[in-house]
Image (cartoon, rainbow, N blue to C red):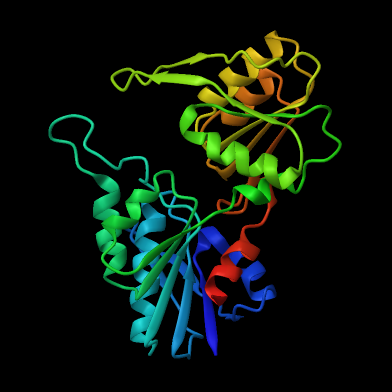
């Protein structure tokens, strides 16, 4: 028997995995001491195998994951699988200037100490798997993004940069029809400013789906939506695997004229209309 151990960040997704037949749920406790330190525990855990499900969008979430790994080992787990629906620090996969850390490498090494294997959902850079010291696999989820889309008029699936065109293509293929294109994006890493150069694809009157792996601050996505609306596109949808939606991201998208924002439950947000549980369950069953 396998027990699913949800982090506080991934409770709904863990429940969906239980519904998929992956294992039974245990109920952890999540506490905080007066000095701010966290304490994640598994008082009801009693099994040989554990699957910990934890998105690590914050520093506290990283600590909580490490504590849950240690807690299940202390409670007798001999085999631990760690599922990371969203891996924080994944975009810090290199030292962009002298003296900077490769933050995701540090996180990966720490996570590896408490688990036998790792599964990540659609990491920003698949190569980050190499930073883990245990067997690590990536799970594709872009095809799930097409599920809430219906009755699109002459659809165009657009990536906000060339690096995301595979995601846009996968989403288009799952939907079943439409064209694929991308914006050219030039980011200034000193200032953080992004310049979008629109493609030549005709958009007038067409429903456009802008597809990316992450919507963080919404700056790039809202810029793309503004360009599309200025060219008289029909409805414009923003879809992503990981709806970080930091600060005023949703407001930016609304102000840009988005029709709807769609994300998965890799991060549990109000726009998480798609569950990655089936994709995770299928990989765990292999």
Residue that extends furthest to the top in the rendered view of this protein: 230
Please state which of residues 152 and 220 is positioned toward the viewer in this rendering.
152
Residue under the image location 71 percent in, 19 percent down: 257
Residue at far left of view: 99
Q: Is residue 223 above or below residue 273?
A: above
Q: Residue at x 29, y 56 (%)?
A: 130
Q: Position of residue 267 (x, y in %)?
A: 56, 51
Q: Residue at x 42, y 52 (%)?
A: 87
Quarter residue 146 falls in: top right
Regarding residue 245, the answer to whether it shows in the image is no
Please identify the quarter of the rendering in which residue 27 is found. Answer: bottom right
Left or right of residue 261: residue 214: left
Instruction: Provide residue 36's location: percent of width, then percent of height.
Output: 35, 56
Which one is nearer the viewer's eye here, 47 or 37? Answer: 47
Q: Is residue 76 visible?
A: yes
In the depicted structure, whether residue 4 falls above or below residue 146: below
Is 162 in front, or is 217?
A: 162
Give left or right: position of 189 versus 50.
left
Residue pictured at 43% horizontal, 54% vertical: 56
Residue sitting at the far right = 151
- Across and down, in percent, residue 197 comes to 51, 13
Looking at the image, residue 216 lies above or below residue 234: below
Please indicate whether residue 252 sits to the left or right of residue 246 in the image: right
Left or right of 182 on screen, residue 38:
left
Quadrant where the N terminus is found in the figure: bottom right
In the picture, the quarter occupied by the C terminus is bottom right
């Amino acid at each position: 028997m396998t027990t699913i151990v949800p982090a506080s960040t991934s409770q709904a997704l863990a429940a969906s995995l239980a519904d998929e037949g992956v294992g039974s749920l245990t109920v952890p406790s999540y506490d905080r001491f007066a000095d701010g330190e966290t304490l994640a525990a598994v008082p009801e855990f009693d099994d040989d195998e554990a699957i910990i499900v934890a998105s690590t969008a914050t520093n506290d979430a990283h600590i909580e994951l490490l504590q849950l790994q240690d807690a299940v080992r202390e409670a007798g787990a001999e085999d631990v699988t760690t599922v990371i629906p969203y891996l924080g620090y994944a975009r810090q996969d290199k030292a962009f200037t002298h003296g900077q850390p490769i933050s995701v490498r540090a996180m990966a090494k720490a996570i590896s100490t408490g688990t036998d294997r790792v599964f990540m959902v659609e990491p920003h850079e698949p190569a980050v798997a190499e930073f883990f010291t245990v067997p690590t696999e990536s799970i594709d989820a872009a095809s799930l993004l097409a599920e809430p889309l219906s009755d699109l008029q002459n659809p165009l699936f657009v990536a906000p940069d060339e690096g995301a065109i595979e995601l846009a293509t996968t989403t288009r293929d799952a939907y079943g029809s439409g064209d694929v294109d991308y914006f050219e994006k030039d980011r200034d890493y000193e200032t953080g400013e992004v310049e979008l150069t629109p493609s030549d694809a005709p958009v007038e009157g067409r429903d456009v789906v802008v597809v990316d792996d992450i919507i963080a601050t919404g700056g790039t996505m809202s810029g793309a939506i503004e360009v599309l609306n200025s060219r008289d596109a029909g409805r414009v949808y923003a879809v992503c695997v990981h709806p970080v939606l930091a600060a005023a991201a949703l407001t930016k998208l609304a102000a840009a004229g988005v029709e709807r924002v769609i994300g998965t439950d890799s991060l549990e947000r109000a726009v998480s209309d798609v569950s990655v549980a089936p994709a995770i369950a299928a990989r765990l069953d292999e």
